[in-house]
Image (spheres, grey):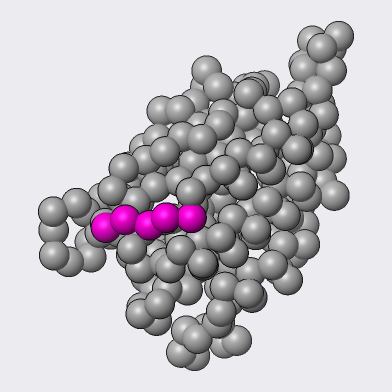
Amino acid sequence: RCTKKIDLCLVLDRSISIKSEDIAKAKDFLKELSDSFLITYDENSAIHWQAAMIGVSSYNTRVYQHVLGHECRDNACVRDEIDAIPNTNADFTETDDALENVLAQCLSLDNTRGGGIPRVTMLANDGNTWETGTTYINSKKTIKVADKLKKNGIDTDVAGLPNHEDNVGIDEWKAIASNFIFDLRVKPDSDFKPDFDDLKPIVGRVARLLCEKYGVE
């Protein structure tokens, strides 16, 4: 379990290309991942949160900010907030708006601790930005927003989700990820045929790599 300081925002894709039962499995993955980062609150300390702060959002046509990091004083709170996310999907995949929300709300300077504590987005999506009202996938805006996050000191890493059409946006992942793409394919050039059940076994590895890369004492 990571006991280092890190400000995390977990962002979940709930677009139409991901079935409701698979959204539930992605939520299980995020619950286990959030439990891997210790949240402990000390009201008598100048820095109340001693290790991680974790916010949670999801998106499809619009963005839903479920909880901010400073609103949860323990891991159970974050787990409950993830559990309460509806297992429903909707048309369109506004990933650019979801990342804009990270900068404006989930990991904004007002809602994080500063002082050199890293701000990191863990984006769980299938890589296909689909703007509302359009008929095609277009990653350009999402890539620009990810670049803006980097310029503002926020890293973005990706947990690559399958989708029911076996059509994932690997090029989008590569363009927006700061350091890690957790790609469930057996080989980088193989067909994308993993199942959402493949997410849970990688929780420990994802947590370890994020903790080692970003966490500070």
Number of numbered labels in the structure image: 0
**Quick check: 125 above or below 49?**
below
Give the residue displayed 51% in from the left and 67% down from the top.
Answer: 21
Give the residue displayed 64% in from the left and 23% down from the top.
Answer: 70
Q: Give the percent coordinates (x, y) of residue 127.
A: 39, 64
The answer to which of 140 and 43 lies nearer the viewer is 43
Q: Give the percent coordinates (x, y) of residue 32.
A: 72, 55
Is residue 89 shown in magenta? yes
User: Dividing the picture into quarters, in which one does residue 140 lie?
Assistant: bottom left
Give the residue displayed 56% in from the left and 60% down from the top.
Answer: 24
Residue interval drawn in magenta: 87-91
Magenta residues, dominant SS class: loop
Visible residue check, residue 142: no
Is residue 94 shown in magenta? no
**Quick check: 145 above or below 77?**
below
**Quick check: 14 above or below 72?**
below
Visible residue check, residue 43: yes
